[in-house]
């Protein structure tokens, strides 16, 4: 998949395109349905499918200090949308100047002049332009004026949840913040993942017999509620693509037994011996085992960690340790 940042970097040989526009944070099941429609339209028209997204999140520019938790890094987003058949991803820096574009300026300048759109596929709640003045109706009007087709896709729902819910990034963020990883996974179509780099911590886990990978994630990453989780640690190639996955027991919190103050994500990789320092990894959360607890002493903590590992094996369907 081709990928570039900034409209000025758009390849000259792109030709007419089918464009889909949105933050696509999480690339959840609703996004997958929408992107699938865009890819199908592109294949039928023999055009490349271009996904347009933004960085940083527009709300941080429009309302500074309101940046939402981010479900997927740009690298992870690129990997996911490429897997759905997208041919190119254009990341537009969302600046104050860009936020002031009128709907007409966005449609003509971005979609027509820069991306040469023959068709545009968006969610039915899509808005664009200064103060979100444009919507699917105005976009269709611009399309008739400038020569591109427009299709608005209905929002997807999750009927398996308690009371049907509309699948959205906001809903998934709430699930993650509450530690409800099963609901988050249903909406995402896969476990929620936190990407980052393995850094040196206090090495206390190694001293206790459970060496952990201390994963430092970018600002605004959607971190699950404090607690212990069953999941996996995924290693990533330099281009951000997934390489290998191994089962892990994961701790999120401040290590209250040792009066910690800094919130960390630490993964104990089952049946692993090696050095992960400096590796780019992803931590996938499958199920919350228990809340974060302060234990009376080291012996009680180690006993709890042994139980956490045993329960991780059970949740993940793994045989007991030999």
Image: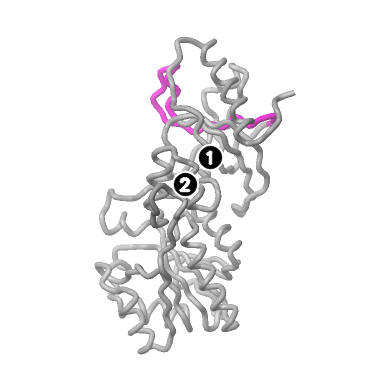
The answer to the question of whether label 2 and label 1 lie on touching residues, with beta carbons closer than 8 A, is: yes
Numbered badge on residue 322 = none
The image position of residue 142, as x and y in percent, is: 34, 84
Numbered badge on residue 184 = 2
Instruction: Name the image quarter holding the N terminus.
Output: bottom right
Q: Does residue 273 appear in the picture of this structure?
A: no
Q: Residue at x 47, y 51 (%)?
A: 160
Residue 270 in the magenta stretch? The answer is yes
Label 1 CA crowd tier, 10 Å (few <14, some 14–19, many 20+) = many
Q: Residue at x 24, y 67 (%)?
A: 131
Q: How far is disc 2 from disc 1 in space, using C-alphas?
A: 10 Å
Residue beneath label 1, please?
285
Above or below — where is 61 with respect to 244? below
Q: Does residue 59 appear in the picture of this structure?
A: yes
Relative side of 59 to 230, left or right? left
- Residue 303 quadrant: top right
Label 2 CA crowd tier, 10 Å (few <14, some 14–19, many 20+) = many
The image position of residue 37, as x and y in percent, is: 52, 72
The image position of residue 277, as x and y in percent, is: 61, 34
Q: Which sits earlier in the primary sequence, circle 2 or circle 1?
A: 2
Q: The magenta stretch spans which residues?
A: 253-274
Q: Residue at x 49, y 71 (%)?
A: 9
Residue 221 in the magenta stretch? The answer is no
Q: How is the image coloured?
A: one colour
Relative side of 243 to 225, left or right? right
Q: Viewer-proximal residue, 105 or 139?
A: 139
């Amino acid at each position: 998949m081709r990928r570039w940042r900034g409209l000025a970097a758009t390849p000259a040989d792109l030709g007419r395109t089918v464009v889909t526009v949105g933050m696509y944070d999480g690339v959840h099941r609703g996004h997958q349905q929408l992107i699938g429609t865009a890819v199908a339209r592109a294949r039928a028209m023999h055009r490349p499918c271009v996904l347009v997204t933004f960085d940083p999140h527009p709300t941080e520019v429009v309302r500074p200090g309101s940046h939402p938790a981010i479900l997927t890094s740009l690298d992870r987003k690129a990997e996911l949308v490429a897997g759905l058949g997208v041919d190119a991803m254009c990341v537009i820096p969302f600046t104050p100047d860009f936020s002031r574009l009128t709907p007409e300026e966005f449609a003509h300048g971005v979609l027509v002049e820069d991306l040469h759109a023959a068709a545009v596929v968006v969610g039915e709640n899509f808005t664009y332009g200064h103060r979100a003045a444009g919507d699917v109706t105005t976009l269709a009007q611009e399309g008739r004026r400038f020569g591109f087709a427009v299709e608005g896709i209905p929002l997807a729902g999750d009927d398996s949840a308690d009371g049907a819910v509309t699948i959205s990034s906001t809903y998934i963020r709430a699930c993650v913040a509450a530690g409800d990883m099963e609901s988050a996974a249903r909406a995402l179509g896969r476990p929620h993942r936190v990407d980052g780099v393995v850094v040196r911590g206090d090495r206390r886990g190694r001293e206790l017999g459970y060496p952990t990978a201390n994963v430092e994630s970018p600002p605004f990453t959607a971190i699950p509620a404090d607690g212990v989780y069953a999941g996996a640690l995924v290693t990533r190639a330099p281009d951000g693509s997934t390489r290998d996955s191994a089962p892990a027991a994961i701790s999120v919190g401040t290590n209250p037994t040792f009066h910690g103050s800094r919130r960390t994500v630490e993964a104990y990789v089952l049946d692993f011996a090696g050095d992960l320092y400096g590796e780019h990894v992803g931590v996938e959360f499958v199920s919350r085992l228990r809340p974060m607890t302060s234990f009376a002493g080291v012996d009680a903590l180690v006993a709890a960690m042994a139980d956490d590992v045993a329960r991780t094996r059970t949740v993940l369907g793994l045989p007991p340790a030999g």
